Image (cartoon, rainbow, N blue to C red):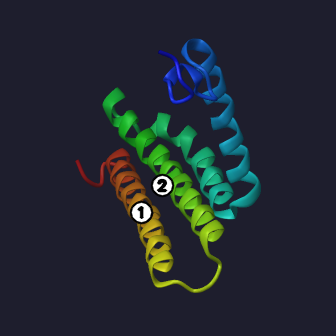
């Protein structure tokens, strides 16, 4: 039986077609973040500046992956926060305690990512200059 709720009738399709549509939607998401979110642009610039230094600072492949993941985690957290804020603004632009709390929690996610990035990169820099081992 094939009704409208069947996974086969999903708007994004199935199989390889779904993969291409999902990729297209992801690209649209990156474009929207770039256009509408100054914090995303700033953090992407930071990532692009730090990325080349990851090859210099890394003492092993695993160390390099930690440096890269700290950069990707920052972008991930900003995208989550931006999506949450856009959705919250669509629901209600008036002051609302729960929406404010959701936005604050989204901001806290980005803060954790920034602290993580800072700690990872400070330790890597100190190790590179043999200040710590």
**Mark 1 touching mark 2, by CB under 8 A?**
yes
Q: Residue at x 59, y 21 (%)?
A: 18
- Residue 13 picture location, percent across and down: 61, 21
Q: Residues within 10 Å of mark 1 (few under 14, many from 20)?
A: some
Horizontal side, residue 8 vs residue 44: left or right: left
* Secondary element type, mark 1: helix
Residue 9: x and y, percent? 59, 23
Q: Which residue is mark 1?
A: 109
| For marks 1 and 2 on the same chain, the one whose residue lies earlier in the sequence | 2
Where is mark 2, residue-wise?
77
SS at circle 2: helix
- Please provide percent x and percent y for residue 111: 43, 67
Which residue sits furthest right? 35
Residue in the foreground of this view, choosing between 63 and 110: 110
Q: CA distance from mark 1 to mark 2?
A: 6 Å
Q: Which residue is pictured at 70% across the width and 63% down the height?
A: 38
Q: Is residue 44 left or right of residue 32?
A: left
| Extreme residue in the front direction | 1
Q: Is residue 82 above or below residue 105?
A: above
Q: Can you say whether 17 is above or below 91 in the image?
A: above
Q: Find residue 25 and report its image quarter.
A: top right
Q: In the rendered view, tell whether residue 15 sits above or below residue 43.
A: above
């Amino acid at each position: 039986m094939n009704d409208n709720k069947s996974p086969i009738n999903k708007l994004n399709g199935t199989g390889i077609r779904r993969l291409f549509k999902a990729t297209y939607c992801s690209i649209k998401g990156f474009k929207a973040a770039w256009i509408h979110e100054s914090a995303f642009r700033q953090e992407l610039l930071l990532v692009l500046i730090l990325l080349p230094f990851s090859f210099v600072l890394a003492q092993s492949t695993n160390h390099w992956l930690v440096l890269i993941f700290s950069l990707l985690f920052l972008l991930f957290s900003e995208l989550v926060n931006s999506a949450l804020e856009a959705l919250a603004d669509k629901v209600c632009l008036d002051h609302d305690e729960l929406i404010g709390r959701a936005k604050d929690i989204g901001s806290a996610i980005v803060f954790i990512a920034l602290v993580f990035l800072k700690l990872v990169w400070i330790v890597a820099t100190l190790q590179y200059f043999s200040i710590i081992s």
